[in-house]
Image: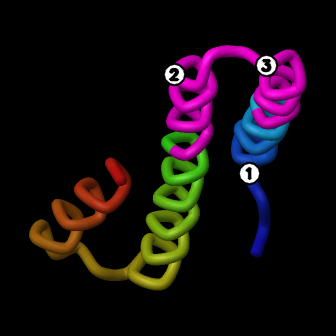
């Protein structure tokens, strides 16, 4: 799978967020703050997963011009 540099950048950003969360926990920061940051990382990773899946399906279905298929791909990309 060829990897889009934008996806790598998103994952690096999530990695940085996780390091920040570890620091927050070490510092004894409030649970709500930690959970908020964890939710942000979770959403980011899910977004990357959706982008990878969408790209994979798009490549496999490149010859298909079915509007319903394209509509479904757009929905998947919003995961």
Which secondary structure, mark 3?
loop
| Residue 33 in magenta stretch | yes
CA distance for labels 1 and 2:
34 Å
Q: Position of residue 65 (x, y in %)?
A: 23, 73
| Residue 39 in magenta stretch | yes
Residue nearest the observer in this picture, 28 or 13: 28
For image coordinates 84% across by 30% down, the residue present is 16
Q: In the picture shown, does residue 27 fall above or below 3?
A: above
For image coordinates 32% across by 48% down, the residue present is 78
Residue 44: quarter of image:
top right
Asked if the residues shown at circle 3 and circle 1 are in contact, with their CB atoms under 8 angstroms apart, the answer is no
Residue nearest the observer in this picture, 66 or 54: 54
The mark found on residue 28 in the picture is: 3
Q: Nearer the viewer, mark 3 or mark 1?
A: 3
Residue 11: quarter of image:
top right
User: Label 3 neighbourhood size at 10 Å, few (<14), some (14-19), many (20+)?
Assistant: few
According to the image, label 1 marks what residue? Answer: 4
The mark found on residue 32 in the picture is: 2
Q: Position of residue 58 (x, y in %)?
A: 44, 71
């Amino acid at each position: 799978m060829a990897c889009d540099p934008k996806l790598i950048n998103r994952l690096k950003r999530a990695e940085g967020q996780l390091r920040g969360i570890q620091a927050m926990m070490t510092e004894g920061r409030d649970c709500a703050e930690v959970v908020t940051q964890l939710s942000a990382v979770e959403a980011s990773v899910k977004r990357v997963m959706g982008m990878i899946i969408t790209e994979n399906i798009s490549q496999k279905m490149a010859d298909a011009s079915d509007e319903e298929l394209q509509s479904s791909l757009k929905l998947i990309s919003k995961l």
